[in-house]
Image (cartoon, rainbow, N blue to C red):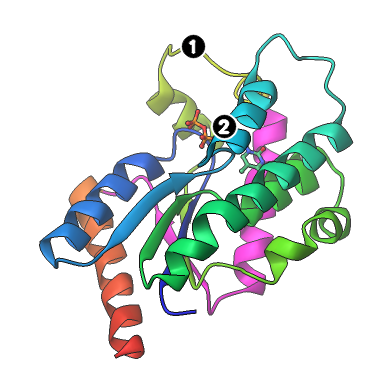
Amino acid sequence: MKGIFISFEGIDGCGKTTQIELAATYLKKKSLEFVITREPGGCRISEQIRTILLDAENMAMRPKTEALLYAASRIQHLDEQILPALLEGKIVLCDRFLDSSEAYQGYGRKLGSGYIRGINAYALEHMPDLTFYFRCSPKQSRVRMGPRQTDRLEQENIDFFERVCEGYEQIASRDKERIFCIDATANIEKIAEQVQRHIQNRLSKEE
Ligand code: TYD
């Protein structure tokens, strides 16, 4: 695979979307080819699955249904968008990937890492080269999100998000080579500089 696959992780309101945009500005300045994409979503079919997943009316959705829909969305997205872009040598900036399922469904919904990794076996074969985890407590993220309208997952209680954070910590401690933990409460420009430094290091390795 010629390109570089980079994912951005963290709980809702951690500021990852802003950081993806800043990373894109940095890559543009360096005249590097990249694509920005997101999970769930990123292509037509996966965006349709996203609508079902985030619909605040779908409160009857079972945890396993939820986990399987995220996995289905991911398989389509990976095959249709991410892998072709990487084959063309592009840098892929992806807002969430498999770590989100492990943190949210594995820990948040208590389905366990084994179950999530099992149903996501195809994604496990194509993990990101680099992942940024924006660390932020559920309380801090609530303050940041403010009174915006919440989707189905954002309506979960603070205990759910505490478990999601615990999940991210476990995942990050297991995979220190790939995942860089960043203090999401730091100054936006400082965070962007850290992200750029890690991307630059990765690019130098490829040369
Ligand atoms: P995201 O697009 O980051 O939400 P927003 O744009 O509102 O910040 O992600 C959508 C939601 O889906 C988010 O609450 C996290 C959740 N999610 C999972 O629970 N499992 C997953 O595998 C993925 C990719 C996302």
Q: Quadrant of residue 155?
A: top right
The answer to which of marks 1 and 2 sits earlier in the sequence is 2
Q: How many marks?
A: 2
User: Residue 40 lies in magenta, yes or no?
Assistant: no
Q: Nearer the viewer, residue 201 or 124?
A: 124
Asked if 8 appears above or below 73 in the picture, the reply is: below
Q: Residue drawn 50% across and 73% down?
A: 129
Q: What residue would you read off at disc 1? A: 149
Residue 8, image x, y percentages: 46, 53
Residue 120 point in image, percent of width and height:
77, 57
- Is residue 156 something that shows in the picture? no
As shown in the figure, which amino acid type bears the numbered disc 2?
A: Glu
Query: Which amino acid does the dot numbered 1 rest on?
Result: Gln
Residue in view at x 74 percent, y 44 percent = 72
Q: Looking at the rendered structure, which numbered label has been put on residue 47? A: 2
Depth check: 58 or 72 in front?
Answer: 72
Q: Position of residue 84 (x, y in %)?
A: 49, 63
The span shown in magenta is 158-186
Q: Residue at 49% of width from left, 11% of height from top?
A: 149
